[in-house]
Image (cartoon, rainbow, N blue to C red):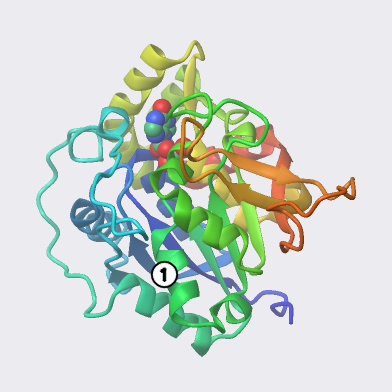
């Protein structure tokens, strides 16, 4: 059942903060269309312990310590401990090497997975998970509770590189590469999944001059983000030839907040879990009936974003973060 007009959509942000995660979290807190009912943490841009600390810190910056933080998995779904951490993108502290003081708050006494399952059961069909990191916590929730896929409203995930090169290597995008087995579980679960991949997020660039505009705002979030964005800009200047930074997480967040910003196709997505293309996401668009049974046959369809209204996304990012 659709939420009544005016009733904000409940969202849980599964996050590995992360500079663009911080932007996405602040954006959500400034968006009247959604109500953030919790943050769950995961490794990716930082290790999970630091993700939890950063999540608590960001909520303190935002004066929103009423929002619970539930700590997520420290290992992949196959219990892997060799994690790929993108500290070279976000700084050793995940937040632009600012050495912020430790948060005063603590995570709740419940795992991310238990929290996801609990909230999905509490508000069947009403909760959207916006997953901004590797998908371990979500896959664990799917495994733990068979009714999770029907009770969760939608899973909007930042992940995948659909028919474009990845950002970890030519095959794989960072969040899917972080736990390909978990990603494959999520994509084939039958849940209502919308994947926002870097084929889309690479179209949304916050330029050097946008950063100067941000600097002209006295807004609390704009001033905070300016500090942490330095490291993210430096990384992009080195790694890419774009004059600015990719707004991965904010784009996925806005796709969850306002679906009319994107268009998508539907089909079955499988994830390569080993070999040189580990982390590759491959969409079968169901246009052809193959003679043989394939690994994509009889798999449920998910939504994969294909276009984005990048100017509208940038406008919303700037307006809401400069308030
Ligand atoms: O070059 C990169 N390598 C690894 N992770 C990256 C890179 N660029 C961005 N991200 C991080 O991974 C997610 C998008 O794939 C984003 O959360 C972003 O912060």
Q: In which quarter of the image is residue 5?
A: bottom right
Query: Is 240 in front, or is 186?
Result: 186
Q: In this view, does 77 lie above or below 229?
A: below
The residue wearing badge 1 is 140
What kind of element bears circle 1?
helix
- Report the side of 85 relative to 183 (left or right): left
Which residue is found at the position 52% from the left and 24% from the top?
170
Specify whether residue 303 is in view: yes
Which residue is found at the position 43% from the left and 75% from the top?
116
Q: Where is residue 238 in the image (x, y as percent from the top left)?
A: 37, 12
Ligand 1 quadrant in view: top left
The N terminus lies in which quarter of the figure? bottom right
Q: Position of residue 69 (x, y in %)?
A: 29, 69
Question: Total label count?
Answer: 1
Q: In which quarter of the image is residue 164?
A: top right
Q: Is residue 3 above or below residue 314?
A: below
Q: Where is residue 289 in the image (x, y as percent from the top left)?
A: 89, 50
Specify whether residue 216 is in view: no
Which residue is found at the position 47% from the left and 28% from the top?
167
Query: Is 260 in front, or is 116?
Result: 116
Which residue is found at the position 46% from the left and 15% from the top?
240
Q: Where is residue 317 in the image (x, y as percent from the top left)?
A: 53, 41
């Amino acid at each position: 059942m659709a939420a009544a007009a005016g009733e904000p959509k409940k969202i849980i942000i599964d996050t590995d903060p992360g500079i663009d995660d911080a932007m996405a979290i602040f954006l959500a807190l400034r968006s009247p269309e959604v109500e953030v009912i919790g943050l769950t943490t995961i490794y990716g841009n930082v290790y999970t312990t630091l993700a939890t600390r950063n999540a608590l810190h960001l909520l303190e910056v935002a004066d929103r310590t009423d929002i619970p933080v539930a700590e997520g998995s420290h290992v992949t779904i196959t219990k892997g401990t060799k994690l790929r951490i993108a500290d070279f993108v976000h700084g050793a502290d995940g937040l632009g090497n600012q050495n912020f003081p430790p948060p005063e708050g603590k995570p709740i006494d419940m795992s991310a997975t238990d929290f996801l399952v609990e909230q999905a059961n509490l508000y069947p069909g009403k909760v959207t998970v916006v997953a901004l990191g590797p998908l371990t916590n979500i896959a664990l929730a799917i495994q733990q509770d068979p009714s999770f896929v029907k009770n969760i409203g939608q899973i909007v995930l930042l992940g995948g590189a659909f028919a474009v090169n990845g950002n970890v290597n030519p095959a794989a995008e960072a969040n899917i590469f972080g736990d390909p087995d978990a990603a494959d579980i999520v994509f084939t679960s039958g849940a209502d999944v919308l994947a926002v991949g870097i084929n889309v997020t690479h179209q949304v660039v916050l330029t050097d001059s946008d950063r100067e505009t941000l600097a002209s705002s006295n807004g609390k979030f704009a001033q905070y983000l300016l500090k942490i964005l330095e490291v993210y800009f430096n990384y992009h200047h080195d790694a890419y030839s774009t004059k600015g930074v990719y707004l991965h997480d904010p784009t996925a967040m806005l796709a969850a907040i306002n679906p009319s910003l994107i268009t998508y196709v539907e089909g079955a997505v499988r994830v390569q879990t080993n070999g040189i293309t580990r982390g590759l996401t491959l969409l079968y668009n169901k246009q052809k009936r193959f003679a043989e049974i394939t690994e994509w046959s009889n798999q449920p369809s998910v939504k994969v974003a294909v276009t984005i209204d990048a100017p509208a996304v940038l406008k919303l990012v700037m307006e809401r973060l400069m308030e």
